[in-house]
Image (cartoon, helix red, strand yellow):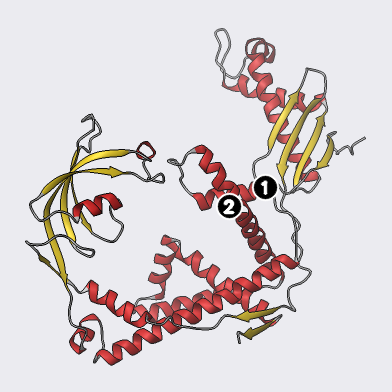
Amino acid sequence: MSPRAASGLEVKVTEGERCRRTLDVSAPAEFVDRERMAATRKYAARMKLKGFRKGRVPPSVIDKRFGRAIEEEAVERAVRKACDEAISTRELRPVDNVDVTEVRYRPGEPLTFKAIFDVWPEVPTGRLGGFRVERPPVEVPEGAVDRLIERLRGEQAVWEAAENGRPEAGNAVTVVMTRLDGDGDDGDASRQYELVLGQGQALPDIEDAIRTLTTGDEGDFDVAFPDDFPDESRRGARHRVRIELLSRSVPRLPEVDDAFARSVGNFEDLDELRSRVGEDLEREARSQAEGEVDNRLMRMVVEANPFEVPASMVERYTDAVLGEAEDVDPEQLDELRAELRPASEFAVRRDLLASRITEEHGLLASCDEVGAQLEAVARERGEPVGRVRARLRKSGALDTLERRLTDAKLFRFLREQSEITVAS
């Protein structure tokens, strides 16, 4: 026999897998009767019937005319209140919506139903330290400085029209493409495009076709659409397309010299530019190495404190990762969900454990810490602190700042409990 609450509720709790709980609830007939009386009074106060003043319609008349609707409302309200009371008396914490099923009620008899939901898991923090984490080496890839300077050089390029010759990778072209085997109703039978060759802005077959033309020429080509093309209706299809090359431009790149260095920033000469670029790349590499230390350490902490997480939390996290996936085939979407599930489950476990550690050890960013960071931002931008705070709050960046400060405190705490070594 399940325990009976003070109100007469009988509640049986069945524990399922992955934090699932099922409540079998039985409420005495009086539970529904009270709600029926309240609903009847509400109807009587609002109804205006011929022969009666508004608010003076006898309950018997109301019940005769609106009995079915009143009973449905009474049962619905009784189920909601009984469900809330059952969850509260058992001190359960639902993660998400409660699924109520198998509602049964006859006048004069108990109201019974099932309530099914996931509860917040118990998050253990048995072991938080004693780990040995290797920091990866801080290395700037060979040639990285040259590649970044070359990218800056490309941003400073001046585009010049080229009348002769065929397009090459890196050239900007303007083309008109006309589909020759369409029905004329697809809305894109003939369109003009501007693109840079070699950057994946067009299908490989289209780029290859453009490279065979000179300015003012046109030709007819067969174009194959890959199996992963965004438009499902064209995946694997082949179309006959006419391409006309309207123009071709080539980039005129500046010389890499002291004048170039001064044009891209506050640098005296090329040597200073290269030095600053190297420093920035090294700083980025160091930041990535420290981030990898935090990731490795947190994974060790999670693996040392196993616990089950609700399936609903994992599904919700997966939905957030996928975002809007309206154009994805349902079967492919299910496969993608299955692939993401292990990573999503780990991420949920990591976030729950991080929150528990933060709460237990008082690691939440304080108002003073947030204020100090805001003052630093305000000084850097030359603005009043109040204006910076208001702007960050409006954009949601203030919450991001607080989380970043909290995460920094969390990982400082975890690092103090373990040994961080340098890769040999």
Q: Quick one: label 2, few (<14), some, or many (20+) residues within 10 Å?
A: some
Residue type at tag 2: Leu
Does 184 sit above or below residue 241?
Answer: above
**Under tag 2, what secondary structure?**
helix
**Under tag 1, what secondary structure?**
helix
- Residue 326: x and y, percent? 44, 40
Q: Is residue 132 left or right of residue 422?
A: right
Q: Is residue 324 left or right of residue 9?
A: left
Q: Which residue is mark 2?
A: 340
The N terminus, quarter of image: top right
* Quadrant of res 133: bottom right
Q: Residue at x 54, y 78 (%)?
A: 289
Question: Toward the viewer: 339 or 107?
Answer: 339
The residue furthest top is 51
- Residue 106: x and y, percent? 78, 18
First in residue order: circle 1 vs circle 2 = 1
The C terminus, quarter of image: bottom right
Q: Which mark is residue 311?
A: 1
